[in-house]
Image (spheres, grey):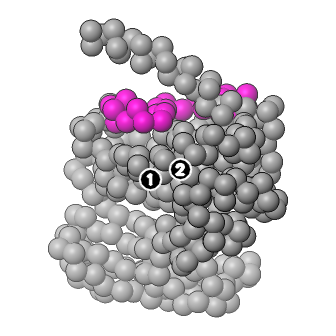
Amino acid sequence: MIPDGFSDEASVIVTRDDGTAMSFPCDQLRLGVMQAGRHATGMVGFRVDEERMPDLASQRRLVIQDAKTGLLIYRRPPVDEPVPHKLLRLELNIVPMLKFDAYCGRHFQYAISAVERFGHETTMQAFHLNAERSVYISGRLLLRNYEDFLDKGFQAIADIPNPYYEMACRLFILKRLAKGPVTFLGDRDRLILAPAAEHFAEVNLEDEKAIRRALKKSPDKVRSVLISPITRQLVCTYPEQRVTRRDVAAAISTLSRFVVVGHGNDHAHFQQAVGELLSLPPMNIPIIPPHSVLEELAERLRAMPIAEQMLEEDLIFDHYVRQAVAPRAGRQGKAQQ
């Protein structure tokens, strides 16, 4: 377990079935890690055996996590019959669906949510759990960097937010970030969002003129946080990469590989489709309902040409997604009649 700090001394937490936990230091030398310049001492290996934990073999739900970050390293099946899928839920909203992940994740052998907080290398390690057939990964990833795994046993699902509502969420989070840390954002996100948080710190989000003025005066580092983030996640390989209209077709092509796609406020469809995929009760799957304050902000943004300009690619993408969703909605309506 290689810690983020070059000279940090790592440790793991082992949790028993009854909830009690034991801490073990990473005191096993891994010479190759030190020789590769990954850690100062190479003391990154750990060993948990019956000498250290006499009741090890009897623990049916044993869990091992990084003591500092809570990152799941290993666990015995959390349920008797884990879901036999490798699933990626691509997070397209800046506000993560944590309750959704917690509910779905506990039905898999291995699960990690908001994986972007741990960086690219840890994310790749999760995707490379080749010996495990029950894996749940969720996060706000740049999919192009991981798309190859859709050819290696992973299935992908996503709930696509309305572009104006997503912009409203981002402005709201930027205001919060200007006042203090936002717990679900990782270090890299905070670094990328810092200029935008500073720019919108004093902007009154209930004042349409103030929002319009702030959007128009946004420097590049601020605009990059708000410009068509959904399309960018589907086609870009690095955060600063820009998108054009030509990228919309590539985003649609990528989305066509997903096994479940939700859209807007059609929560019942997304719940039902995910439930069928995972063989779980659909109505038990938690969905975050839209917040009235953010919906009002989204409506104000909808009336601003500058917001439309910044969301151009996402709005085109959203149009085609709605066109694809509409026939299904029509069929459902006729069936109900």
Q: Are marks 1 and 2 in contact (CB under 8 Å)?
A: yes
Is any atom of residue 233 visible in this view?
no
Determine the image quadrant of residue 123. bottom right
Residue that label 2 marks: 297
Q: Please identify the quadrant where the C terminus is shown.
A: top left
Between marks 1 and 2, how big is the CA–CA gap? 6 Å
Q: Amino acid at mark 2?
A: Leu
Q: Seen in the image, is 57 located left or right of residue 256?
A: left
Q: Amino acid at mark 1?
A: Val
Residue 170: give x, y in percent of width and height.
58, 57
Residue at image point 34% right, 14% down: 333
Is residue 253 in the magenta section?
yes
Numbered disc 1: secondary structure: helix
Residue that label 1 marks: 293
Residue at image point 36% right, 86% down: 23
Residue at image point 55% right, 63% down: 173
